[in-house]
Image (tube, rainbow, N blue to C red):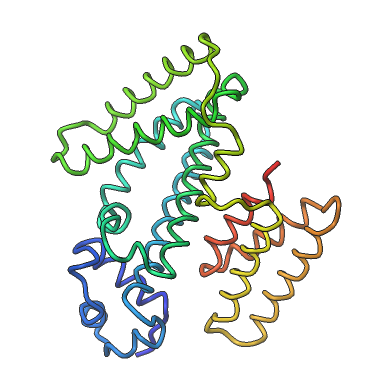
Amino acid sequence: MNITKQDIIKSATKLFKEQGYLSTSVQDIANDYGIAKGSIYKYFSSKEVLFSEVFDLCQNMYFDEMKKIYLQKGLSLREKFLQQIVFRFQYFTEYKYILVEFTELPIQQNEKFKPLRQRVRARLISWHKECLESLYGDKIKPYLYDLIFIYRAILKEYLFWIIYEDNLISMEEAAEFILAKMDILVESTIQEQSNPIINRSAYEHYINGGNTVNKEQLIAEFIGEAEKIISELPYGKSYQGELYELITILKAEIEKEKHSEPLVCAVLSYLEKEIELKSIIIQLKNVISMN
């Protein structure tokens, strides 16, 4: 039987989703696909590494669906905002064993998973930033970062109620309620004209995990991670060479005082098609677009 890395990830995703991390063994995954346990270790050195790949895949699927919501025609920004809240509740409930219940597990400290989790957190916060900016516009600019974290806190608490209280709360009603309260919060904050607590510098420090790094450092780190992933791809040297060449073009263009945005976007879009690179390339996109 020809088995690929993606086949194993698909099987592992199903079992982690149904049973959770602790209740799923590598042997369970091998049995589910009808292969020897050793076949899995050819691709993944441990269950922790495999879970990291599954976690990354589920996050990418989540963001892909979120983007589809915002690309829908005929919906107002408010309707799109509501839909993405409801979808968040639905998706995180469905994948709670992968996306929610890992927080108390030793996997949190795993060498591969820890930086991945940090990148995902930064990506989620950036997404919430985009959503709030699109709905409320420039009027929230002075208070944007405070509103982001208030909104995230509200979402988190309602999500836990929805997941663990046997659907006592309607997802749609919760979404409507949250948005109505955000409307009130935004208007009262603007009217009071109080001083914001969180500024841009503090925000960037937080999403970078407490590390003080500049844009150039972040770009270098993400490109280095992309190159490492390319070196480990189970494909021929020719394909790897093509990807390395694109990375070289990207680095050369970014280093220019004024780079070509169409060229950078084209290279990033091509690299993003490689599923192993998708998560890191999206993060790289976000950093490059930072003002």
Residue 243, position in %: x, y? Answer: 67, 74
Q: Residue at x 67, y 44 (%)?
A: 290
Q: Determine whether 161 is above or below 105 in the image.
A: above
Q: Residue furthest right?
A: 257
Comparing 19 with 1, the one in front is 19
Comparing 122 with 65, the one in front is 122
Q: Quadrant of residue 87?
A: top left
Number of callouts = 0
* Residue 269 located left or right of residue 253: left
Q: Determine whether 246 is above or below 35 in the image.
A: above
Q: Considering the image in quadrants, where does the N terminus appear?
A: bottom left
Q: Residue at x 21, y 37 (%)?
A: 161
Residue 289, position in %: x, y? Answer: 68, 46
Q: Quadrant of residue 231?
A: bottom right
Q: Determine whether 88 is above or below 12 in the image.
A: above
Residue 126, position in %: x, y? Answer: 53, 42
